[in-house]
Image (spheres, rainbow, N blue to C red):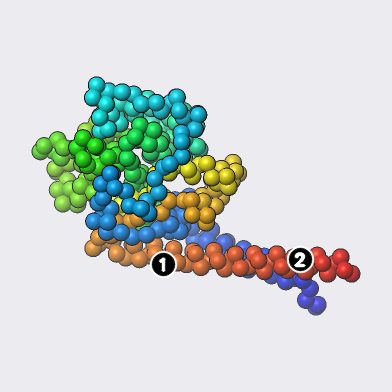
Amino acid sequence: MKWTPWRSCSLLIVLMLSPLLLLISLYPSATELVKLRNALVFNVITEAEADWPGTAFPASFRQEQTPLPLALTGLMQPVMTEHAAKDLEFVLANAQRLNLHHKRKGGAIQANTAHTFNIIAEQQQGYCADYTQVINVLAYAIGVPVREWAIAFDGFGGHGHAFNEIWDDRRQQWIMLDVFNGFYPVRRDDQQPLSVLAFRQLLQQSPEQIQLQLIPDSAFGFRDEAMAIRYFQRGTDQFYLWWANDQLTQESTAIVRHLAAISIHLSQLAAIVSGQYPQIKAISQSDNQQLLEEMLQLKRWLWRLFYLELLLLVCLLICLYRALTSRSGS
């Protein structure tokens, strides 16, 4: 049987599809696919490396610079308070436009910020990452530094939770803010708000010192405080920080915007490859070293696979060109 250029093309297609089918078989669920996405942008830092003030972002942290689009300008005009300080109370006053007194419901919205904002405010739908997306942009609109954190319960996959941390200029500290679940944590003895790192430390060492302060006029996302604390304790070894808050910049990138209309997963892949997708910085501690190394190994394997697929694609295009030119020549 004669070996033709078309047979070579067919072989290359099989070689390209085989590892992709293997990935689908190994990671069949949506939460496991999130783990693959997270692995591509996964990094490790110490707690000390995450403990920087909101007045001095690291140079590598991508801060939002894109002006608010017209669709958001009217929605996110600052609501002024009596003192109008850039503090927790100022952020909470502005967050009230999301109608947080309603119980949150529904699945992921996964749309641009303007559409997500309207769905949350009008229908109280969405999941935690939709709320963090809106709070990121809301904080930017009112001039408050913001970071986004997440925890996982499945080895840094999609089974977990996302929440914000805002910089309180009056108190000169970060304050954890879980808008989706309607609370921020405080220290029980002095009622001082907690940063994410302080909250995590108390979860591990003295959970009885944690009190959850409900956001005024907001529905609480758990049956009771004890249930909420147990929930977060499950993920103390899998806290990670998203190393960017430039949601609007990501949305305005042409290739990401156009591909989002086709598939959110394809859009995210394009953002990762083009460097637009934010990096993950997982907090290292003594008892999660194996988890971290597994993710770093998966990251190395996935990027090798990506470059192999890219090489095979180039070979396939060359093969197709030769097959077509040989046909036209005959």
Dot 2 corresponds to which residue? 321
Quarter of the C terminus within the rendering? bottom right
Task: Answer with left or right where residue 41 lies relative to residue 45.
Answer: right
Q: Position of residue 45 (x, y in %)?
A: 30, 59
Query: Which kind of residue does numbered mark 2 sit on?
Result: Tyr
Where disc 2 sits, the SS reads: helix
Q: Position of residue 277 (x, y in %)?
A: 46, 51
Residue at image position (38%, 36%) is 140
Q: Nearer the viewer, residue 124 or 279?
A: 279
Residue 304, above or below 65: below
Q: Position of residue 85 (x, y in %)?
A: 25, 30
Residue at image position (54%, 63%) is 306
Residue at image position (33%, 27%) is 94
Where disc 1 sits, the SS reads: helix
Q: Nearer the viewer, residue 277 or 235?
A: 277
Query: Which kind of residue does numbered mark 1 sit on?
Result: Gln
Q: Nearer the viewer, residue 94 or 290?
A: 94
Residue at image position (28%, 44%) is 54
Dot 1 corresponds to which residue? 297
